[in-house]
Amino acid sequence: MSDSFSDLITDALNERQNAHLLRSRRTLKHLDATHVLLDGKQLTNFASNNYLGLTHHPKMLAPMDCPAGAGAAGLISGYTDLHHRAEEAIAKWKQTEAALLMPSGYQANLAAIQTLHAVAESRGKAIRFILDKLAHASLIDAVRQTGATMRVFSHNDLAKLERLLEKRERGSVDVVVTESIFSMDGDAADLRGICELKSRHDFVLLVDEAHGSGVYGPAGSGLVAELGLRDAVDISIVTLSKALGVSGGAVCASRQFIDAVLNFGRAYIYSTAVSPWVATGAVRAIEILRDEPDRQARLREISTRVRRSLADSGIAIPAGDSPIIPILLSDESAALDVAHTLESAEVLILAVRPPTVPRGTSRLRVTLSCEHTGLEIAHLINCMQITKAPRFQRKSRGRR
């Protein structure tokens, strides 16, 4: 690399360092579903999306009699009987006609958006994507990659969404894009309201259930299923690397749309198929969700209890009952300082800073697991109450 470009990299990294925004990795050793070893010290992990503790479930750790890799793209020779079985299990679980395994949730969103755009473009139709302002970066990046028109409505502002829908050009296609549970705020989309809008406006609805799957709905099938809105949602994205404890993702939709992804979704067409191990792990995870409903029930109970305790102590907590609990701080430096203080108390919670969240909303992102013990939950609450003043946003100030 030329010296001149190396200097540019140095300047860019230094700028982030000075703004308390530089990112780096720390090497952890995972001891079990909720404990890690960091620099020789055991910490309770409240910074993982392992909501149901499946990463270390005995059934997930049992030997898998399958190849380590697929060896080819799914449209060449990488699509095996194990992939077929997993896709059937995911579709049945998500109550859709079909599902398509992808290497990540990011690529699942990319493939779905690519397909919607390519199909419309191939038929000479203009297409417009309308996103909730807090939609995940993978959804925003996917739309930008297509070059299609993108409009944004303020978070859960359905009045603004309807005004945008009323401006649809005759013969064009509108696609409304949202998460069910938002990854950084931990609150829920107004899915009932959005689905009600479909009775008055013609649009395709894509819902990313990355953080709703495993937590909500029958056997963890998601918030869409819990609310009885399956028929109103056209495309559902599931991430297998969070509550399901493996890796990868899937596009869940009609058989027709999945066939379209096979033909137009470049993120699928040009990627090696997921490991057969992942496919097998996904089937096992869904079986655990069905057979051990107490995991989901305990997670919901813990989430409600922690939220209530923090709110009662005066800390501003968003509405909802998800296991994602953001605690806003005054700035990036304060978020890093509190995270360090918590680490000294054997609690791992990381500071989330821009550009992951908007400027002025740096936070601690607490995530809960059904595997956290009562004592660990009590310790978490106590640590938060001790360290809150004066940096946490208080309940009286409301949400951003």
Image: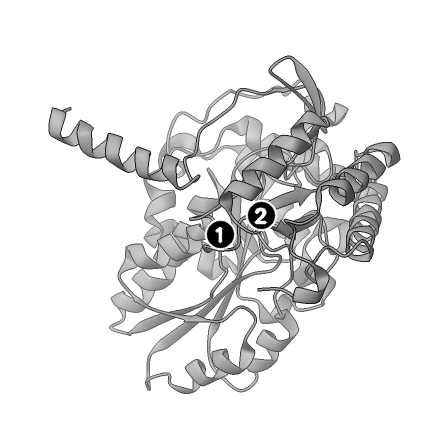
Identified by mark 2, the residue type is Arg
The residue under label 2 is 363
Q: Are marks 2 and 1 in contact (CB under 8 Å)?
A: yes
Which of the image's four quarters has the C terminus?
bottom right
Q: Residue at x 61, y 65 (%)?
A: 189
Left or right: residue 138 compared with residue 398: left
Give the crowd class for mark 1: few <14, some 14-19, many >=20 residues within 10 Å. some
**Depth order, front residue of 112/183:** 183
Which of the image's four quarters has the N terminus?
top left
Residue lying at the far front in this picture: please name it. 390
How did the renderer colour the structure? one colour
Q: Name the image quarter holding residue 28.
A: top right
Work out whether residue 279 can be spotted. Answer: yes
Q: Residue at x 55, y 34 (%)?
A: 247
**Depth order, front residue of 168/287:** 168
Q: Establish if 391 lies above or below 347.
A: below
Q: Nearer the viewer, mark 2 or mark 1?
A: 2
Q: Name the image quarter holding residue 257.
A: bottom left
Label 2 and label 1: CA atoms lie apart by 9 Å
Work out whether residue 2 can be spotted. Answer: no
Q: Which mark is residue 387?
A: none
Q: Secondary structure at mark 2?
A: strand
Identified by mark 1, the residue type is Val
The residue under label 1 is 357
Position of residue 304 measured from the top left corner of the image (x, y, whole percent): 81, 53
Position of residue 131 measured from the top left corner of the image (x, y, whole percent): 45, 66
Q: Residue at x 80, y 53 (%)?
A: 313
Position of residue 199 measured from the top left corner of the image (x, y, whole percent): 57, 84
Mark 2 or 1, nearer chain start: 1
**Depth order, front residue of 227/299:** 299
